[in-house]
Image (spheres, grey):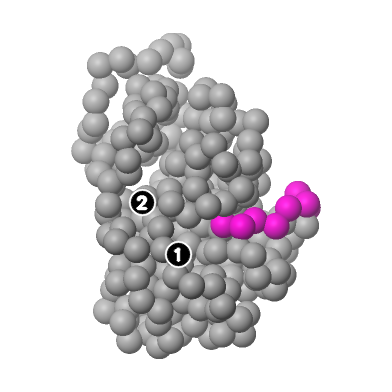
Amino acid sequence: MVHAAVDAMAGPKPTLLRRLGARVRSQLGLPFPWVREKLLGRDLVLVDGTLTSEPDYDEAWLHLCAQHAETMFDVGSNVGQSALIALLCPNVKQVVLIDANWEALSVAAQNLIRNNLSDRARFVCTFASDVNNEQVDFWTVGTGAAGSMFQSHAVTAARGGFVRRVSTMTVDHVAEMIGIVPDLVKIDVEGAEMKVLAGAVAIASRKRSRLLIEMHSLPELPMRENARRVLAWAEAAGYAVWYLREATRITTPDPIQHRGRCHLLLQPADWDYPPWLVGIKQSTPLPEG
């Protein structure tokens, strides 16, 4: 079995096909092929499907936030694309990858080890939530990036009955366990944003962290209600909420209530909007070097 062979001719593939291939390989227990990729000017060898074929909405925002951070919690790390972006910033000293999907987290570890980036990484396999040691249903297929506690948001997993019982942990507990307070927290948890925030009260109280959050609208939790809860949390924590697409501070859900997915930046209320984010639009490509 040639598990470590690199397909040197592999180029970008349609994201749907790459995800389908990863899902089939995972279900059949087949090894993932390695491919050569370039990210931020660095030549990498990665498990096929690690990088999206087109820029995601938030990659440029994440990259710039990482350039102004030393420690990052990557909550909902999946196979490690965000962690790679952060660890390719020389100022980043440590990234803690947190994900409930052990298959995805294992691929992330392979990616970082293969590219000599694992010395600045920690891995915590848990569902980031508002309490510790609770068992919750987690709907996912293989290394699927859309794993969620909400059955309606994980359509493929729900259709096939692919659900796992996973244990929860707060990010406050992770910070205490590791002994660091992150200055950047990336949250991409497919609808469970408030669960993560409710477990990050101690981190927020230190007033030294930025939180980059991908917001989702679900049948069980429409965007308006999800945003209302996040705004209430931010006000109680002394944080301001910025809608990144418009680079504007929001105090009500109105500007984003129509969105199916969007990105917010939460930071202490007395911090100005980062000048280095001004002019960076949604889906802006990452620099090539």
Name the residue type under label 2: Ala
**Picture residue at 32% right of the left edge, 78% below the top:** 256
Q: Can residue 168 be seen by looking at this rendering?
A: no
Q: Residue 85: image x %, image y %? A: 45, 41
**Magenta region:** 177-184
First reached walking from the N terminus: tag 1 or tag 2: 2
Q: Residue 187: image x %, image y %? A: 50, 60
Q: Is residue 256 magenta?
A: no
**Count of numbered marks:** 2
Q: In the depicted view, which residue is nearer to us: 24 or 214?
A: 214
Above or below — where is 188 with respect to 107? below
Q: In the depicted view, which residue is nearer to us: 181 or 224?
A: 181
Furthest residue toward left: 14
Quarter of the image with the N terminus is top left
Name the main secondary structure of what is drawn in magenta.
loop
Q: Can residue 115 be seen by looking at this rendering?
A: yes
SS under mark 2? helix
Q: Residue 261: image x %, image y %? A: 33, 67
Label 2 neighbour load within 10 Å: few <14, some 14-19, many 20+: many
Q: Dot 1 corresponds to which residue?
A: 274
Quarter of the image with the C terminus is top left
Q: Dot 2 corresponds to which residue?
A: 60
Q: Dividing the picture into quarters, in which one does residue 23 lie?
A: top left
Mark 1 vs mark 2: give the one in front: 1
Q: In the depicted view, which residue is nearer to us: 37 or 92?
A: 92
> Cα distance, mark 1 to mark 2?
14 Å
Q: Residue 105: image x %, image y %? A: 55, 40
**Picture residue at 58% right of the left edge, 66% below the top:** 196
**Picture residue at 49% right of the left edge, 36% below the top:** 88
